Amino acid sequence: MFDIVSFIPRAVVQDIPLLFGSTGESLTEKSGNLNLGIPGVMYVGGISGVIGAFLYEQSLTASGAAMKAFPAVAIPLCASLLGSLIMGLIYCFLTVTLRANQNVTGLALTTFGVGIGNFFGGSLIKLSGSDVPSIALSATSAHFHRALPFAAKLGWFGQIFLSYGFLAYVAVIVSLIAAYVLRHTRVGLHLRSVGESPATADSAGISVSRYKYVATCLGCMIAGLGGLYYVMDYASGVWSNNAFGDRGWLAIALVIFTIWRPNVGVGASVLFGGLYILHMYIPSGMNLAVKELYKMLPYVVTIIVLVLTSMRNKRENHPPASLGLPYFREER
């Protein structure tokens, strides 16, 4: 029988990387930048956190000191944010300052990020002397994966709503804050105006380049946390090269599915996470082809939503007018 109580928590832990990635990409696209490098950014965010955690654990081994909760969380978190920020700055320098093609830059950034992650991941595996092609940071992961102490006493409610690590709740809070800023603040109004018509925003005294830089770099930092969550919480601190799968691309698809609204992403990401693991709960025997068809469901649903929203022909359901287009101030 289909066990909904066990299914929802598994869907949620699948959706958190997607929620981080889609929230970051939504902010980026609202500024008019189409960053197809999100998969690479999430990869770099993950490996940067792994590097920070690995160096911290190695220092404890050398000194014989006990692990403390705050540095065990803060060091990988700061390392992940820094690595993701660097990726955002690279993208902005190429697309905003040098006005390079955003599609090509984003795809190059994905390839670059995966290559960087695999290089440093392979190096850490060799340094650790592991007999398998992976590195385990279980002690650090335990601090990320720690749930609320009273969750187990609340039965199904605690299992569904309170059994996650702190980054899961951070993802929800960040998405709600992002939605509020975009819809109800002057900063959000300026950001949306930059994405819709940068020439008009520029003539109104709004710094187009500054908003694009800040929104894109902040979006990359948020997306990078999705990579950190995947490694430290979902994968229990185990890093393996090329283990992220297509989660980065699913995060980009989720942006379209949510119609560029981060708050809608909270529920939509759970749906995506559920569709992503649905093949594990639907009997299909040994027929692998059927399982692959089930794995297509998130993308099929995105296409259906895209068609339906296009048919409704509402302006708020469409992407920013200048999305993917470089801004040349001299042509204003």
Image (cartoon, rainbow, N blue to C red):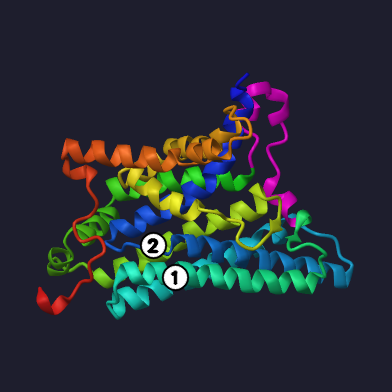
User: Residue under circle 2?
Assistant: 36
Q: Secondary structure at mark 1?
A: helix
Q: Residue at x 35, y 56 (%)?
A: 27
Q: In the image, residue 264 lies at what x, y percent?
A: 37, 39
Residue type for callout 1: Leu
Magenta stretch? 140-164
Q: Residue at x 23, y 55 (%)?
A: 320
Q: Residues within 10 Å of mark 1 (few under 14, many from 20)?
A: many
Q: In the image, residue 121 lies at what x, y percent?
A: 66, 69
Relative to the observer, which residue lies in front, 72 or 228?
A: 228
Q: In the image, residue 77 lies at what x, y percent?
A: 61, 61
- Image: 155 above or below 58: above
Marker disc for residue 200: none
**N-terminal label among 1 and 2:** 2
- Image: 271 above or below 42: above
Relative to the observer, which residue lies in front, 222 or 181?
A: 222
Q: Residue at x 16, y 69 (%)?
A: 202
How far is the residue under mark 1 from the one under mark 2?
8 Å
Residues tagged 1 and 2 counted as in contact (Cβ below 8 A): yes
User: Residue under circle 1?
Assistant: 109
- Image: 275 above or below 262: above
Q: Quadrant of residue 79?
A: bottom right
Relative to the observer, which residue lies in front, 295 or 86?
A: 295
Q: Secondary structure at mark 2?
A: loop
Instruction: Locate residue 314 relative to residue 84 in the image: left or right.
Output: left
Q: Residues within 10 Å of mark 2 (few under 14, many from 20)?
A: many
Q: Quadrant of residue 285?
A: top right
Q: In the image, residue 18 lies at what x, y percent?
A: 49, 48
Instruction: Locate residue 20 relative to residue 303 in the image: left or right.
Output: right
Is residue 82 something one can see in this rendering?
A: no
Q: Main secondary structure of the magenta part?
A: helix
| Residue reaching furthest to the left | 332
